[in-house]
Amino acid sequence: MLIGELSRRTGVSARLLRYYESQGLLDAGRGTNGYRSYDEDSVVTVRQIRALLGAGLSTEVIREVLPCVRGERPEFEWCAELWDILNGELAAMDARIGDMQRSRGALAGFLTRP
């Protein structure tokens, strides 16, 4: 299928699909006319990418974990390396949340002072 069809089927813009390809997340063949060509599995791959982005993972991390992702939901084939990567991402997210809570407390403190 061409990029426009993949875009319609996934609700993801062609620009983002090209970005995913440039990040090594999505594979596209090339027709004799030079147009990108995607297979049926690309629909699921794009949905997996969107779900992982929605979980707060960067494209760099997604590139590492995507080979272990199965289904649109997505589900993982667990291994020690994948577990370590996702635990590291969760710890980093918790640290960012803590930093934001401290910043929020400081800002709220400014607002309570006359």
Image (cartoon, rainbow, N blue to C red):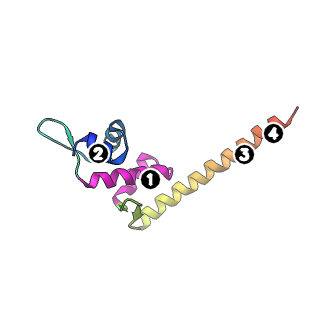
Q: Magenta span covers which residues?
A: 40-67
Q: Is residue 35 left or right of residue 12?
A: left
**Residue 65 sits in quarter:** bottom left
Question: Residues at badges 3 and 4 in contact (C-beta under 8 Å)?
Answer: no
Point out which mark residue 102 bears: 3
Q: Amino acid at mark 3?
A: Arg
x%, y% of residue 56?
51, 50
Q: Residue at x 88, y 31 (%)?
A: 114
Between marks 3 and 4, how big is the CA–CA gap?
Answer: 11 Å
11 is within the stretch colored magenta: no
Between marks 3 and 2, how big is the CA–CA gap?
Answer: 43 Å
Look at discs 4 and 2 and give the one toward the viewer: 2
**Looking at the image, can residue 35 be seen?**
yes
Residue nearer the viewer, 46 or 105: 46
Mark 2 sits on what residue? 6
Between marks 4 and 2, how big is the CA–CA gap?
Answer: 49 Å
Q: Earlier in the sequence, mark 3 or mark 2?
A: 2
Q: Amino acid at mark 4?
A: Gly
> Label 3 crowding class (10 Å Cα cut-off): few <14, some 14-19, many 20+?
few
Point out which mark residue 52 bears: 1
Q: Amino acid at mark 1?
A: Leu
> Label 4 crowding class (10 Å Cα cut-off): few <14, some 14-19, many 20+?
few
